[in-house]
Amino acid sequence: MSSKFFLMALAIFLSFAQVVIEANSWWSLGMNNPVQMSEVYIIGAQPLCSQLAGLSQGQKKLCHLYQDHMQYIGEGAKTGIKECQYQFRHRRWNCSTVDNTSVFGRVMQIGSRETAFTYAVSAAGVVNAMSRACREGELSTCGCSRAARPKDLPRDWLWGGCGDNIDYGYRFAKEFVDARERERIHAKGSYESARILMNLHNNEAGRRTVYSLADVACKCHGVSGSCSLKTCWLQLADFRKVGDALKEKYDSAAAMRLNSRGKLVQVNSRFNSPTTQDLVYIDPSPDYCVRNESTGSLGTQGRLCNKTSEGMDGCELMCCGRGYDQFKTVQTERCHCKFHWCCYVKCKKCTEIVDQFVCK
Ligand SMILES: *[C@@H]1O[C@H](CO)[C@@H](O)[C@H](O)[C@H]1NC(C)=O
Ligand SMILES: *[C@@H]1O[C@H](CO)[C@@H](O)[C@H](O)[C@H]1NC(C)=O
Ligand SMILES: *[C@@H]1O[C@H](CO)[C@@H](O)[C@H](O)[C@H]1NC(C)=O
Ligand SMILES: *[C@@H]1O[C@H](CO)[C@@H](O)[C@H](O)[C@H]1NC(C)=O
């Protein structure tokens, strides 16, 4: 897909959806879908970065300079959103994207640990997508990783396969994603200034997590797989690992407050200060149990829960003690699969009636 078409699709989608310009709506770059893509071909207008609602001034400038990068910003945002929804699928807050003011809705106006996670995972998604796009030769301004050979790599192994360009991905993601926060000017000590510091910290934590999980990958050469020769390169970790690591950081995120000099400091001063890889938050989480227009919480009414689980996905916790309804659904699965010569697998369809539970 050419980046021109992608931009057009975005512009059209965004104007149809009447996306209000709002904090962090660069995330909306991750919300394109094939239906909107096809409309592009019909209209065929020239895309303009300035038409992309949701980008800040600085982000629009970067969009003009690096048009071919925008598709990967969008892919990165989408990867981040999907990972967020996976990590929180069994939680009261499930990272759903509903509101039309920003893709995650009003919940993001609260500086909670869920907001912290969302910023981190989307920034991480952008590093991931840009680094890979460089390696795959999709961008005019970067190519394979030029990372130095690791010192501990055995001497007879070759260093130099085409690696993911994480340095470039990190730098571009930092410039683009942080631009919006850096442009906002607020009085020192104000709530908004605390939010900016919080967002910047969590963006960085997300980017660094991608960086620190990247590893050396190698391929064997040599006669009949003897592996006498190896070529190695730098490779991104599977994004699921990034999500898992950030989820752990979410669980141990640090509550922060502004001090008298306008810096974020830990509320509980007995703990070690959070590092650049930790997540930080400044507000308690809203009540995700009940729907609340003003906080943007969707509530858990109608959510599926697990009757026998004692975890967050269990009906007791998920439904916040309101109880649940039971109903039966028919589940169809592939079963009795047989391998046929050659080469396909044929399965039967088995149906089963299962009990499901939804929160009142
Ligand atoms: C979306 O925005 C429009 C106005 O821009 C508003 O009337 C509508 O209620 C919003 N929808 C949601 C789900 O917030
Ligand atoms: C919605 O949330 C706000 C802020 O926490 C709270 O003051 C208000 O009472 C809540 N409204 C409902 C209907 O729960
Ligand atoms: C997330 O929760 C909302 C409301 O609680 C629900 O409408 C939505 O389907 C859920 N999403 C997923 C992926 O479960
Ligand atoms: C419900 O939870 C139990 C206990 O954690 C688990 O063994 C079971 O697989 C879960 N069921 C579903 C449908 O997820």
Image (cartoon, rainbow, N blue to C red):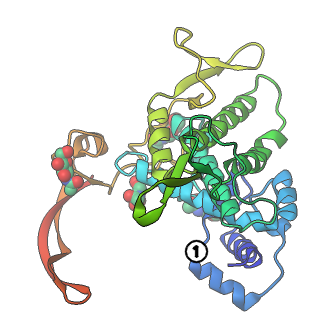
Q: How many residues crowd mark 1 within 10 Å: few (<14), some (14–19), many (20+)? A: few
Instruction: Kindly indicate the quadrant of the structure image that contains residue 345.
Output: bottom left
Question: Looking at the picture, how far across and down is residue 122, in whole percent?
Answer: 60, 50
The amino acid sitting under disc 1 is: Asn
Residue 346 or 149: which is nearer the viewer? 149
Question: Under tag 1, what secondary structure?
Answer: loop
Image point 24% across, 44% down: which residue? 314
- Mark 1 vs ligand 3: CB below 8 Å: no
Ligand 3 placement by image quarter: bottom left
Residue that badge 1 annotates: 33
Residue closest to the far top: 270
Q: Is residue 58 visible?
A: yes
Q: Is residue 51 left or right of residue 86?
A: right
Q: Is residue 237 left or right of residue 314?
A: right
Residue 128 or 84: which is nearer the viewer? 128
Q: Is residue 95 visible?
A: no
Question: Looking at the picture, how far across and down is residue 247, in whole percent?
Answer: 45, 40
Q: How many marks?
A: 1
* Above/below status of 140 relative to 88: below
Q: Is residue 163 left or right of residue 220?
A: right
Task: Tell me the quadrant of the picture where the N terminus can be found.
Answer: bottom right
Residue 180 or 223: which is nearer the viewer? 223
* Above/below status of 140 relative to 106: below
Image point 58% across, 79% down: which residue? 34
Residue 84 or 336: which is nearer the viewer? 336
Question: Looking at the picture, how far across and down is residue 312, in whole percent?
Answer: 30, 41
Residue closest to the far front: 223
Image point 68% across, 57% down: which residue? 130
Instruction: Kindly indicate the quadrant of the structure image that contains residue 257.
Output: top right
Question: Looking at the picture, how far across and down is residue 339, in whole percent?
Answer: 18, 82
